[in-house]
């Protein structure tokens, strides 16, 4: 009974054929955000290893990962310092909880380090296992705050259409994805949405400059607050730059005006930094790049560069003081809140970002370099707009460049382009007609050149398809 079971030939990709892996994958693994039947018929791509900014699949293909996994591998793949931190911590103490008057040293160290790298109003952190859980914590925490403030009627949280805040009940409710709200009885009560600050879709057709549109979009928040009654509104939540929605970079006027409106009505401001945090935008946090001062900040992804799961909420002084001084027990938490292995990797990751100077690298060097490269793509016949913020970038594919006419819905131009990307060894994501990138922060100028050459090839092949099929104006 206690005999060790000899492992079957699982593990090394070489021991089983790609077809074999794909068959087992289709038979047992339900993938996130996936049409199961369609994937089973096509077969998954099996990724077997990675180094720096490159992936290798089970067929030996070399792929440039311009999406950092899922916006998370900020320090790139294969960083030994993170591997060592995890191994050391697993040997010393793989797990202990932080519920019953106990704590672990990596969780303390990470909390201390986070207080140092986040804006000055943040001295406290609540850990979760993911960004979605972090946003569940936000919902519980802001409502608890207003209860303690003697304003329990302040329940409503305002978010935005096309926002992404995760996939739990609260995360998906805060998010503004119509397809997600259509399944599972969402959004939950007390969450409402305003329009996103997407100039191309909502400002340009009105003939507004970006800056003028930023103020109009912020005013939608004030209108919604007044419609609901300010005494009912608990918080506003937004990503500094909307990521999964298609890298929607707001005009520079937007966030400072949102801040002014939240201040005016005493409403808590929550920055979802799950993508923008840890250097992505060229500052440590997206709110610093966009010029606002949130009360709470959700983080995940880049905190460990995705090497292990970890998330949390930075709690600003205004909320922390109330929860600590007046709150009594906060009846909320996760088994893995402050997981020692995840926190040890988080500490190693933040130290590595500091040692390599990655935030400065993005701000002073590769961020501006990428921006210039994207600018040069604006002359391409398919490109209606090209924008970047730090190392996030979006290319809008249009049918008629002169008029800015979009492709009709039935032509899935983004998927066509994405197909060419996969075919040419490049991971770039399609969100509708927007092709988006968020490469690892360790990317060099030479690697950006290599990525741009691939992007140009993929755009040219997409253009050739469009010409051949008569999709253009
Ligand atoms: C990915 C993401 C989340 C959800 O994080 P998970 O770790 O997948 O739960 C939340 N907010 C934003 C902005 C994200 O990009």
Image: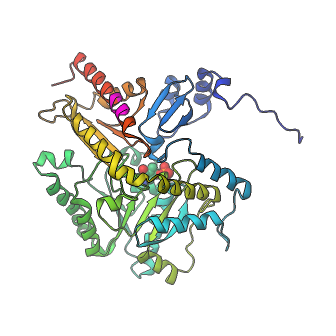
**Is residue 59 or residue 260 the one in the foreground?**
59
Of the 4 image quadrants, the one containing the C terminus is top left
Q: Quadrant of residue 370?
A: top left
Q: Is residue 453 magenta?
A: yes
Q: Which residues are magenta?
A: 449-454
* Residue 294, horizontal then vertical, whole percent: 36, 67
Q: Residue at x 21, y 19 (%)?
A: 470
- Residue 307 seen in render: yes
Of the 4 image quadrants, the one containing the N terminus is top right
Q: Quadrant of residue 119?
A: bottom left
Q: Residue at x 12, y 34 (%)?
A: 403
Q: Is residue 172 magenta?
A: no
* Residue 33, horizontal then vertical, whole percent: 47, 40
Residue 450's place in the image compared with 303, above or below, is: above
- Residue 172 seen in render: no
**Is residue 314 or residue 424 the one in the foreground?**
424
Q: Quadrant of residue 285?
A: bottom left
Q: Is residue 331 left or right of residue 293?
A: right
* Residue 337, horizontal then vertical, whole percent: 59, 62
* Residue 58, horizontal then vertical, whole percent: 57, 25
Q: Residue at x 65, y 66 (%)?
A: 105
Q: Is residue 272 left or right of residue 465?
A: right
Residue 125's place in the image compared with 170, above or below, is: below
Residue 52's place in the image compared with 360, above or below, is: above
**Is residue 115 or residue 148 the one in the foreground?**
115
Q: Main secondary structure of the magenta part?
A: helix
């Amino acid at each position: 009974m206690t005999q060790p079971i000899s492992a079957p030939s699982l593990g090394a990709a070489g021991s089983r054929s790609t077809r074999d892996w794909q068959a087992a994958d289709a038979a047992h693994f339900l993938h996130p955000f996936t049409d199961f039947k369609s994937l089973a018929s096509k077969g998954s791509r099996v990724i077997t290893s990675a180094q720096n900014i490159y992936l290798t699949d089970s067929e030996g293909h070399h792929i440039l990962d311009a999406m950092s996994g899922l916006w998370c591998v900020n320090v790139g793949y294969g960083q030994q310092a993170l591997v060592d931190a995890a191994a050391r911590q697993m040997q010393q103490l793989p797990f202990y909880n932080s519920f019953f008057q106990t704590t672990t040293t990596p969780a303390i160290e990470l909390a201390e380090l986070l207080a140092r790298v986040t804006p000055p109003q943040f001295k406290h952190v609540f850990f979760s296992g993911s960004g979605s859980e972090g946003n569940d914590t936000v919902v519980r925490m802001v409502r608890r705050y207003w209860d303690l403030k003697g304003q329990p009627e302040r329940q409503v949280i305002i978010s935005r259409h096309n926002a992404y805040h995760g996939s739990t009940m609260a995360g998906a409710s805060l998010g503004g994805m119509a397809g997600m709200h259509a399944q599972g009885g969402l959004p939950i009560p007390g969450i409402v949405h305003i329009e996103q600050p997407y100039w191309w879709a909502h400002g340009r057709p009105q003939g507004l400059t970006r800056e003028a549109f930023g103020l109009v979009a912020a005013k939608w928040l004030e209108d919604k607050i007044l419609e609901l009654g300010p005494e009912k509104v608990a918080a506003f939540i937004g990503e500094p730059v909307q990521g999964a929605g298609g890298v929607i970079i707001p005009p520079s006027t937007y966030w400072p005006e949102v801040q002014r409106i939240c201040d005016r009505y005493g409403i808590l401001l929550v920055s979802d930094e799950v993508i923008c945090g840890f250097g992505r935008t060229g500052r440590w946090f997206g709110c610093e790049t966009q010029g606002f001062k949130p009360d709470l900040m959700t983080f995940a992804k880049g905190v460990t560069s995705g090497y292990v799961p970890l998330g949390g909420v930075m709690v600003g002084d205004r909320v922390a003081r109330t929860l600590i001084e007046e709150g009594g027990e906060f009846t909320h938490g996760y088994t893995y809140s402050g997981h020692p292995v995840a926190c040890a990797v988080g500490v190693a990751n933040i130290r590595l970002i500091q040692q390599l100077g990655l935030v400065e690298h993005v701000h002073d060097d590769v961020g501006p370099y990428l921006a210039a490269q994207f600018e040069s793509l604006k002359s391409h016949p398919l490109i209606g707009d090209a924008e970047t913020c730090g190392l996030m970038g979006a290319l809008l594919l249009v049918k008629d460049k002169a008029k800015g006419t979009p492709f009709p819905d039935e032509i899935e131009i983004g998927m066509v382009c994405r197909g060419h990307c996969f075919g040419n060894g490049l991971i770039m994501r399609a969100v509708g007609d927007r092709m988006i990138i968020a490469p690892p922060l360790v990317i060099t100028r030479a690697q950006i050149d290599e990525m741009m050459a691939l992007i140009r090839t993929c755009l040219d092949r997409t253009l050739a398809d469009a010409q051949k099929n008569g999709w253009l104006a």
